[in-house]
Image (cartoon, grey):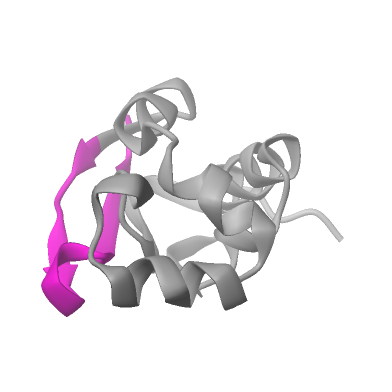
Amino acid sequence: MRYQDEFDKVFISFVLHGFVQEDRLKIIANAQRALWTGSEFILLDYNEFDLKQSPGLVRLTFKMECPLATDFIGRDLQAIRREQGFDEFRVHPHYLGYVWLLPLRKAG
């Protein structure tokens, strides 16, 4: 079943970083398609940051994390959200900014 313009919110938590970029874009596109105009895709996941410049504990954590997570933190989610049809990008940082909650609003 394909959903289109049926939901006012879609929420995923620590999902995108575990996929290759092509599949991440498909997940975002599916969420965008399922939402009404003006509704939100809410994403909780790792923030964008330079792992090499991070404290030792963060680098150690990423040695135990899924290898795709390192690719994910280097992606420009602001550019991706525009390309995927979201016009608002509010950032709510957590855990010293290494994790963020992102409500993305579907463009109308």
Between residues 104 and 72, which one lies in front from this camera angle?
72
Between residues 38 and 102, which one lies in front from this camera angle?
102
Q: Position of residue 36 (x, y in %)?
A: 44, 49
Q: Position of residue 11 (x, y in %)?
A: 45, 71
Picture quadrant of residue 29? top right
- Is residue 41 depicted above or below 108 in this figure? below
Work out whether residue 49 can be spotted: no
Which residue is at 49% across, 29% downward? Answer: 84
Q: Quadrant of the N terminus?
A: bottom right
Q: What's drawn in magenta, residue-wise? A: 88-108
Which residue is at 31% across, 44% downward? Answer: 50
Q: Quadrant of the C terminus?
A: top left
Residue 85 vs residue 78: left or right? right
Q: Is residue 97 magenta?
A: yes
Q: Position of residue 55 (x, y in %)?
A: 23, 66
Between residues 49 and 77, which one lies in front from this camera angle?
49
Picture quadrant of residue 98? bottom left
Residue 102 vs residue 76: left or right? left
Which residue is at 24% across, 48% downward? Answer: 53
Picture quadrant of residue 95? bottom left
Residue 33 vs residue 108: left or right? right
- Is residue 12 depicted above or below 88 in this figure? below
Work out whether residue 100 can be spotted: yes
Q: Position of residue 90 (x, y in %)?
A: 14, 51
Residue 65 vs residue 52: left or right? right
